[in-house]
């Protein structure tokens, strides 16, 4: 053998030295003691402890782990040893001398030590994942802030709709009613020998009537007055309006007529329901819709089922599927969830579950 040719041990040593992180062997002995048969040169850089020091005092590794993460470390070690499965754990360590907290990940493969019955040894790699963890946390934080902003915008929009609807109904409606009354007084004083004036007055009167109807319709679109009577009454009213306008059979059932929700909660749930009906009218080609509202323990569950063509999985991922996204975001803002499933015989079931913020004792 050429003495200049590297041996397998040298090659493995070189591989370990050039591997990012810490290449190690860890053993759990039958008596419960632990040891590190091998630690690469990356030990000090990752853990702040030299390899020889950690091999002499292997219990120091657990001491590095933050107290709240130790149980998860020990549980995952025992699970890997018992099932002889890959040990994959991530958690936080704190290095006193550096005053530094970091996230680490270890991934190791176990095998039973034949020369030591009841003992298990892992061969694996530890790596520093602090940067990726911080990125994940920042992403999660950003998403949470975005969700809060979205919920706030929706609440502001709902408040603005309510204000505009009230002003349209009260101010414009009141003015038009006054105009109609004044017009009726003028009609009574018109000369009998000038029928063309009576025709003009009749036309203006019908125009006022149409405008009053338009104001009523716009006000209801902005904020249905039925919401003042609670979510059950509002949903029941909307079901009737949908059936009348779309010609699609629509039924509503509720096992508890006394379901009470905060006004913003009720308005958000009602908007989700409206969007679901709009989607059915546009895309489902359904002939019947069934709506149910239930209280289950601490949840309020709204289910909308149709017998249409259903939603293809690809349709849910379309960039333009803003209706479904909006419904999902509104449900999340309520602390709830929205799920889509296929109905028996075809069609789609939309299920919205939200927290019952005012639970009633049964």
Image (tube, grey):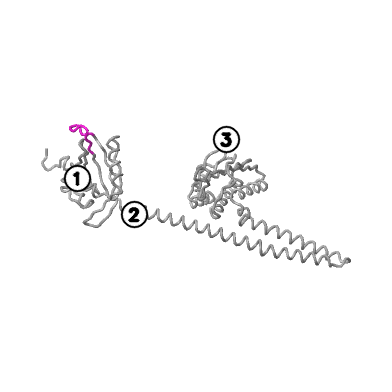
**Is residue 295 or residue 276 the one in the foreground?**
295
Whole-number angstrom distance, CA of label 1 to CA of label 3: 62 Å
What residue is pinned by disc 3? 345
Badge 1 crowding class, 10 Å Cα cut-off, few under 14, some 14 to 19, many 20 or more, is some
First in sequence: mark 3 vs mark 2: 2
Magenta residues (range): 112-121
Q: Secondary structure at mark 2?
A: helix
Judge whether residue 119 is colored magenta.
yes
What residue is pinned by disc 2? 134
- Rendered location of residue 227, percent (x, y): 60, 53
Observer-side mark, 1 or 3, equals: 1
First in sequence: mark 1 vs mark 3: 1
Identity of the residue drawn at 86% across and 67% down: 191
Q: Give left or right: position of 125 versus 213.
A: left
- Rendered location of residue 188, percent (x, y): 83, 65
Judge whether residue 279 is colored magenta.
no
Proximity of marks 1 and 3: CB atoms separated by less than 8 Å: no
Whole-number angstrom distance, CA of label 1 to CA of label 2: 28 Å
Q: Which mark is residue 280?
A: none
**Is residue 358 or residue 267 the one in the foreground?**
358
**Is residue 174 or residue 91 the one in the foreground?**
174
Report the magenta stretch's main SS.
loop
- Rendered location of residue 116, percent (x, y): 18, 33
Whole-number angstrom distance, CA of label 3 to CA of label 2: 47 Å
On the rendered image, what quadrant is the N terminus found in? Answer: top left
Residue that sits furthest to the right in the current view: 193
What residue is pinned by disc 1? 58
Q: Secondary structure at mark 3?
A: loop
């Amino acid at each position: 053998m050429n003495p200049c040719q590297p041996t397998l041990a040298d090659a493995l040593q070189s591989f370990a030295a050039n591997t990012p992180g810490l290449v190690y062997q860890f053993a759990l002995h039958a008596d419960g003691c632990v040891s590190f048969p091998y630690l690469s040169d990356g030990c000090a850089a990752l853990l702040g402890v030299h390899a020889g020091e950690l091999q002499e005092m292997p219990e120091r590794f657990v001491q590095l782990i933050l107290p709240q993460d130790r149980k998860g470390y020990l549980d995952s070690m025992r699970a890997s040893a018992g099932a002889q499965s890959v040990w994959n754990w991530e958690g936080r360590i704190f290095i006193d001398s550096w005053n530094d907290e970091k996230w680490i990940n270890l991934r190791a493969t176990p095998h039973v030590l034949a020369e030591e019955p009841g003992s298990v040894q892992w061969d694996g790699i530890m790596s520093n994942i602090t940067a990726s963890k911080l990125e994940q946390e920042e992403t999660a934080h950003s998403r949470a802030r975005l969700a809060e902003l979205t919920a706030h915008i929706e609440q502001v929009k709902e408040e603005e709709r309510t204000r505009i609807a009230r002003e349209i109904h009260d101010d414009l409606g009141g003015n038009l009613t006054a105009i109609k009354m004044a017009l009726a007084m003028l009609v009574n004083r018109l000369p009998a020998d000038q029928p063309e004036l009576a025709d003009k007055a009749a036309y203006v009167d019908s125009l006022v009537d149409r405008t009053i109807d338009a104001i009523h319709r716009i006000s209801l679109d902005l904020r249905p007055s039925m919401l003042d009577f609670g979510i059950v009454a509002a949903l029941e009213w909307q079901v009737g309006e949908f059936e009348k306008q779309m010609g699609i059979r629509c039924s509503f059932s509720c096992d508890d007529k006394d379901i009470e929700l905060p006004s913003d909660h009720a308005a958000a749930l009602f908007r989700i329901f409206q969007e679901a009906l709009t989607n059915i009218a546009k895309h489902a080609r359904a002939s019947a819709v069934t709506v149910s509202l239930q209280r289950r323990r601490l949840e309020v569950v709204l289910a909308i089922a149709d017998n249409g063509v259903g939603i293809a999985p690809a349709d849910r991922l379309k960039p333009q599927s803003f209706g479904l996204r909006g419904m999902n975001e509104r449900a999340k803002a309520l602390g709830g969830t929205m799920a889509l499933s296929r109905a028996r015989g075809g069609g789609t079931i939309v299920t919205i579950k939200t927290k019952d913020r005012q639970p009633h004792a049964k």
